[in-house]
Image: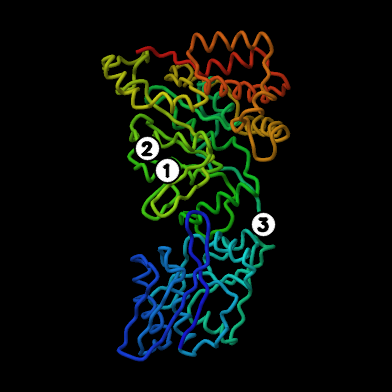
Amino acid sequence: MLSRILSGAVFGLEAYPVEVEVDLAMGLPAFSIVGLPDAAVKESKERVQAALKNSGLRLPVKRITVNLAPADIRKEGSAFDLPCAVGILAADGVVPEGAADGYMIVGELALDGRVKPVRGALSLAITAGRDGLKGLIVPAENAREAAVPRAAPVIPVSTLPELVAFLRGEADLKPVDTEAIAFAPGAIATDGDFADVAGQAVAKRALEVAAAGGHNLLMNGPPGAGKSMLAKRLAGILPPPSLEEAVATTRIHSVAGTLPEGGGLMATRPYRAPHHTISDVGLVGGGTIPRPGEVSLAHNGVLFLDELPEFRRGALESLRQPLEDGTVTISRAAASVSYPARFLLVAAMNPCPCGYLGDPGHACRCSPREVARYRARISGPLLDRIDLHVEVPAVPADELMGRAPSGSSKELAEGVAKARARQAERLGPGRCNAHMAGDEITQSCAVGREGETLLARAVSNLGLSARAYHRTLKVARTIADLAGSDAITPGHLAEAIQYRQVRVEI
């Protein structure tokens, strides 16, 4: 007896159909899986046998061969457990012939027959809708996630017997009500308000500019000055994501298996803060079967790298492509895959190994050679891709105790939202000044004769590269947007130029 069940697999962000063929033949009892399965797929036979037995269903005492087609693409993960079990039952006559036709089935089986969640349900739903299938049968915990694109009917199942009863016409499983899954964008949960931060007026202003224009930011200051605290509060002034941004972000986290419990649409911008011991693959993605890294998990959100010089040199250099192009490409012998990685980078570092160079309250113990070696861990090309460089000095005691009123996160968020609205009107929905290129910079960043003179002096005195020159123009455009100005004035330009200066000497 032979049966065919349609399933699916994910490579990169894209899903493709996989046909699970099951053949029952006479001979000594055996169970083999072919079609380039990885270790997790090979172990599927043990889970399927136990799940069938513990669900009160019989495993045929025959030679069972399962083929995963196309056979020239490597299959990985546990999503083939459920279609394998259904295919065996269909080949044995327990499930009527043709009952599963038109459905894509995915799911991992527990030993007691429960259906457990899998990665990539959203991408699988998009493929099921594109191919015009009757529906996608997924684990109940993946149902809200798979229903996000509203591409095909999504039928949730909790146990193997429940699915068998549905295919035999003995139970009625209702598709997920997509209308009940409403999109309500929210802000990123933060640890506090900007109003709680004493002093640091320059750093707060730089963070406001970064949020308004989507500009990358580097904070340099001694330990305890508040760099991490400021970075965490930045998330609270970013505008909520659009529906398109939320779907794109959810898709990446679905493939990576990092969606919050309960699934559904990610209505907040992601905030990722990996430790400096992270590997190159962990940061930008990769592996034998490519997976998204932290830069992709931060897509449409914030990536915070604390203690920037402590990260591996290779990991930092691999940030160049995503910072420039908004994508990261992982190439392997068999194929290459690209993940979106359009994030706002916020980095923090100390001015020297001990952290107290230039701090009037502490003596620096580092030699000039140690300081130079420490700073050399961050290459010039990487620094050139960071738009805003700001010092975060230690806060004096009188400012800590005096606590003069400062702008709250709510006030800053309102200004950021207005600036982003101006940019969306000028550049299109979802785009901000940091994304401008070529003609857009020429059209939107005219500075006049006085501004050109100021820029020429900055290029000469600060040694700005062509990339830094254009990034300075983008920052000036953002500062003008925050001021509600159509024109970039010399004042706006001067503020943008100061964010390219390094004032702590070795």
Determine whether the residue tagged by mark 1 lies in a helix, strand or loop.
helix
Callout in the foreground (2, 3): 2
Q: Which residue is mark 2?
A: 315
320 is higher (above) or lower (below) than 406: below
Residues at marks 1 and 2 touching, judged by CB atoms closer than 8 Å: yes
The disc label shown at residue 284, or none: 1
Residue at 62% x, 66% y is 131
The disc label shown at residue 418, or none: none
Determine whether the residue tagged by mark 2 lies in a helix, strand or loop.
helix
Residue 398 spot, x, y in % from top left: 47, 16
Q: Give the spatial CA distance, label 2 vs label 3.
A: 38 Å
Residues at marks 2 and 3 touching, judged by CB atoms closer than 8 Å: no
Which is nearer the N-term, disc 3 or disc 1? 3
46 is higher (above) or lower (below) than 446: below
Identify which residue, 84 or 182, lies in the foreground.
84
Amino acid carrying label 2: it is Ala
Residue at 47% x, 80% y is 87
Determine whether the residue tagged by mark 3 lies in a helix, strand or loop.
loop
Which is nearer the N-term, disc 2 or disc 3? 3
All told, the count of numbered labels is 3
The disc label shown at residue 182, or none: 3
* The N terminus: image quadrant: bottom left
Amino acid carrying label 1: it is Val
